[in-house]
Image: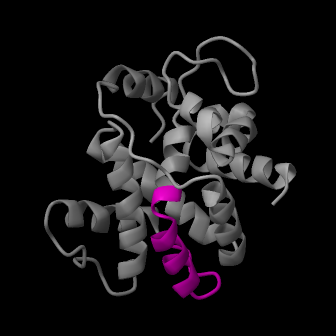
Amino acid sequence: MTTVDLDRWGARIAVLVAPHETELAGAVVRAYAAGGRRRQDLFRGTGDAPGGMGGSLMTVLPDVLDALAWASRAVNAALGSQQVGNAVSTAALLVAVRSRREGGTGTGLARGEAPTPQDVEAAYRMSERLRERGMEPADAERLACELFSGLSEHSDPGEVAAFLDRLLTAEPPQPMPRGPRARRWLRWLLGRGGRG
């Protein structure tokens, strides 16, 4: 996968979950895919912007990429099991993921609306990772469902698998030290301009 491909994927993901980060998305994806120090720098709240642009920058994309990489097996399984053109409704998926988090089965939807168990697993694993990174459960679930629904609607499963493989090539996602990140998420949410 070339740098151009990584940049294209970065822009696609940013459009789905963080449109205000589209300009830096390619640099963020390349840094995440590189692993090591470059990836670690993405998670420092006071680090320089990707690409050596200087200044402090708060973004959600590193955490979204990490959640996507963390759940890569579940995402590949879910997208690989779908029929072509079978997009997953964000709202239906969100209901199912929230039901699962609250101990339910996520099957209270009408048969034609309900996402598959594989879809729920993929979105749930992504949201779980985002919650581990300090995101509020409702926001983590919404972002994960928006991302998975967007991928299911506009992506070829083989292309998604190749992208996820590239994210994992340098190193698998590692647990981050837990700490207070509430201010970071508050700034990010305020920056969305009330979207969502």
171 left or right of 146? Answer: right
Q: Residue at x 55, y 39 (%)?
A: 62
Q: Residue at x 57, y 83 (%)?
A: 80
Residue 69 position in % (x across, y down)? 53, 57
Q: Quadrant of residue 101?
A: bottom left
Q: Main secondary structure of the magenta part?
A: helix
* Frontmost residue, 171 versus 18: 171
> Quick check: can you spot residue 63?
yes
Q: Check if residue 85 falls in the magenta segment.
A: yes
Q: Residue at x 65, y 11 (%)?
A: 55
Q: Specify the quadrant that holds the N terminus.
A: bottom right
Q: How many marks?
A: 0
> Quick check: can you spot residue 114?
no
* Frontmost residue, 49 versus 78: 49
Residue 40 position in % (x across, y down)? 55, 33
48 left or right of 143? Answer: right
Q: Check if residue 124 falls in the magenta segment.
A: no
Q: Quadrant of residue 180?
A: top left
Give the residue at the far left of this rendering: 103
Q: Residue at x 45, y 31 (%)?
A: 194
Q: Is residue 93 above or below residue 172?
A: below
Please give the range of residues in magenta: 69-88
Q: Is residue 51 above or below residue 14?
A: above
